[in-house]
Amino acid sequence: MRKTNILDLARMKAEGAKIVMITAYDALFARIFDDVGVDVILVGDSLGQVVLGHPDTLNVTMEDMVRHTAAAARGRKRAFLVADMPFLSYQTGPSDAIRNAGRLLQAGAEAVKLEGGRNAAGTIRAVASADIPVMGHIGLTPQSVHRMGGYRVQGKTDPQRERLLDDAAVVQEAGAFAVVLEGMPAVLAGEITRTLSIPTIGIGAGVGCDGQVLVMHDLLGLFDEFRPKFVKRFGELRKPVEDAVGAYAAAVRDGSFPGKEHSF
């Protein structure tokens, strides 16, 4: 299939075709998802929780993101590849943001994603002006977990709703080519989607967005530390993995593996 690019995503919104986005953090899964035909692969800073074992995304470093972005880039051929900018890689100023976003593109990403609305507009504008495509991210922004008092749905009150409508408009005006809408009422996300000319990608934001994204470990049923309400588990792979490894361990211990057919 032909390589997906930023113009394809804009065309999909215009035609009403839903955008499929999923996270991946290594070459193997990026290749599998690419073969299935997903439109966008996100190397998310969610790797802090589902890969590195941190309690949140705040401990993920640029070195982590560069390494995993490069790995995913080596696995995919067709899907559009977006990399998250981790905490403190862009909040410290436009020059740092441009430099760090450039590192992710050099690692193989085709765009970067950063969190924030009006407060991040200057940074989005600076990075986009350096010819680095930027995907915005508003609503429940995990890097702001302490300010929000936890992973709480945003936009439930009138002031929050007005703020998110403003954030969406400002992110678009600053030059973002798309925006993730996370953890907000479906009605609000639908309103934002209809208002913007750029694609919206929902996660916990209802069906009215132009596309959807989920963390691969969540939708595959591999991650059990917590289960957000917005996650649908499209597979239950943890049990088969446990069964396979348990069978391997038993075979090693009882001496039935390796057998003659596995020996030289």
Image (cartoon, grey):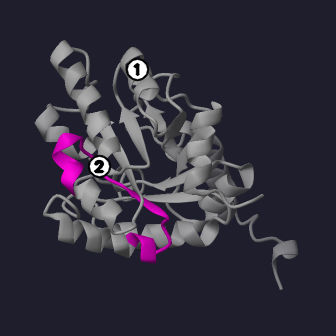
Percent of width and height locating residue 41: 55, 54
Q: Quadrant of the C terminus?
A: bottom right
> In percent of the image, x 56 and y 44: which residue is there?
10
Can residue 236 be seen in this snapshot? no
> In percent of the image, x 37 and y 66: which residue is there?
65
Give the extent of the magenta segment. 104-122
The tag on residue 191 is 1
Q: Which of 227 and 132 is in front in this view?
A: 132
Percent of width and height locating residue 247: 68, 52
Q: On the image, which quarter does residue 248 sit in? A: bottom right
- Position of 165 compared to 246: left or right? left
Query: Counting residues from the N terminus, which is met first, the one under dot 1 or under dot 2?
Result: 2
- Position of 8 compared to 46: left or right? right
Q: Nearer the viewer, residue 211 or 178?
A: 178
* Residue type, mark 2 in image: Ala
SS at badge 2: helix
The tag on residue 174 is 2
